[in-house]
Image (cartoon, helix red, strand yellow):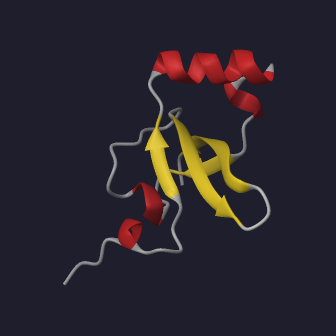
Amino acid sequence: MAIDITDHRAVPEHRKLDEDEAEEVFERYGTQKEDLPRIERTDAALKQMDAEVGDVIEIERESPTAGKTTYYRVVIEG
């Protein structure tokens, strides 16, 4: 029996950005893809999506002090 960990309440929402969305993020924060923190393609949270090396992943986490926070990661080989 396979378990989908993305359904677990402790796993934040992960979403792959399209190229236009990623460019907007880079412009908004004055950064580049190479500057983003990394996430391995084999990460369990990415198993259910079609993530490839170089994709930008948006991660939304619940925070008790800040409400909802958004993080961005670039997919690397893992």
Q: Is residue 42 left or right of residue 56?
A: left
Q: Picture quarter containing residue 52? A: top left
Classify 70 as above or below 65: above
Locate the C terminus and report the quarter of the image it occupies. Answer: bottom right
Q: Which residue is drawn at 42% across and 75% down?
A: 8
Residue visible at 53% across and 74% down? 10
- Quadrant in which residue 24 is drawn: top right
Residue 62, located in which quarter of the rendered image?
bottom right
Q: 73 or 42: nearer the eye?
A: 73
Q: Which of 2 and 20 is in front in this view?
A: 20
- x 48%, y 31%: residue: 17
Where is residue 29 drawn, in percent x and y? 78, 24
Is 58 on the left or on the right of 71, as rendered?
left
Percent position of residue 25, x then y: 65, 24
Q: Which residue is drawn at 67% across and 45% down?
A: 71
Image coordinates of residue 50 in percent, x first then y, are 33, 43
Q: Is residue 69 above or below residue 34?
A: below
x, y percent for residue 75: 55, 42
Q: Can residue 42 be seen in this view?
A: yes
- Image height check: is 40 above or below 58? below
Would you place residue 1 above or below residue 25 in this image? below
